[in-house]
Amino acid sequence: MIICMKAITVHVSEPVYQEFRDHARKTDRKAAELIREAMDLYKEQTIRRSSGISLRDLRPVSVGKVLRPIRKDDDILGEMIDL
């Protein structure tokens, strides 16, 4: 799948842009790539979240290390729907 890119002009403060450039240099990437990723993240976390997406549309997120296995008494669904 080919994705066409749209060139845009964005005005940001010099310190913010410098941070992107410094991080890009440290990670061997381009600042434009980092800015595109930041825009994608904003789109996913803010724009799509406010557009009425169902929980069913969201992908699972890892919460890190599992502290202990889930037990039967851990389920609060019954309490939530008064079972």
Image (spheres, rainbow, N blue to C red):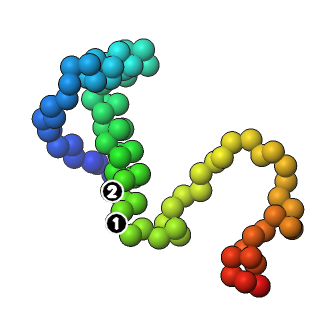
Residue 33: x, y in percent? 32, 31
Find out whether the residues at labels 1 and 2 contact each other: C-beta distance under 8 Å: yes
Q: How crowded is mark 1: few (under 14 residues within 10 Å), some or many (20 or more)?
A: few
Residue 80: x, y in percent? 69, 76
Residue 31: x, y in percent? 30, 25
- Is 43 drawn above or below residue 15 in the view shown? below
Q: Is mark 2 on a helix, strand or loop?
A: helix
Residue 28: x, y in percent? 40, 18
Q: Is residue 59 left or right of residue 40?
A: right
Residue under the point 32% across and 23% down: 20
The residue beneath circle 2 is 47
- Is 5 drawn above or below residue 22 in the view shown? below
Front residue of 49/56: it is 49
Q: Of the residues shown, which amino acid type is indicated by label 2?
A: Ile
Q: Is mark 1 on a helix, strand or loop?
A: helix
Residue under the point 12% across and 35% down: 9
The residue beneath circle 1 is 51
Residue under the point 77% across and 46% down: 66
- Residue 48 falls in image quadrant: bottom left
- Is 26 drawn above or below residue 67 in the view shown? above
**What number of labels is visible?**
2
Residue under the point 15% across and 31% down: 11
Q: How crowded is mark 2: few (under 14 residues within 10 Å), some or many (20 or more)?
A: few
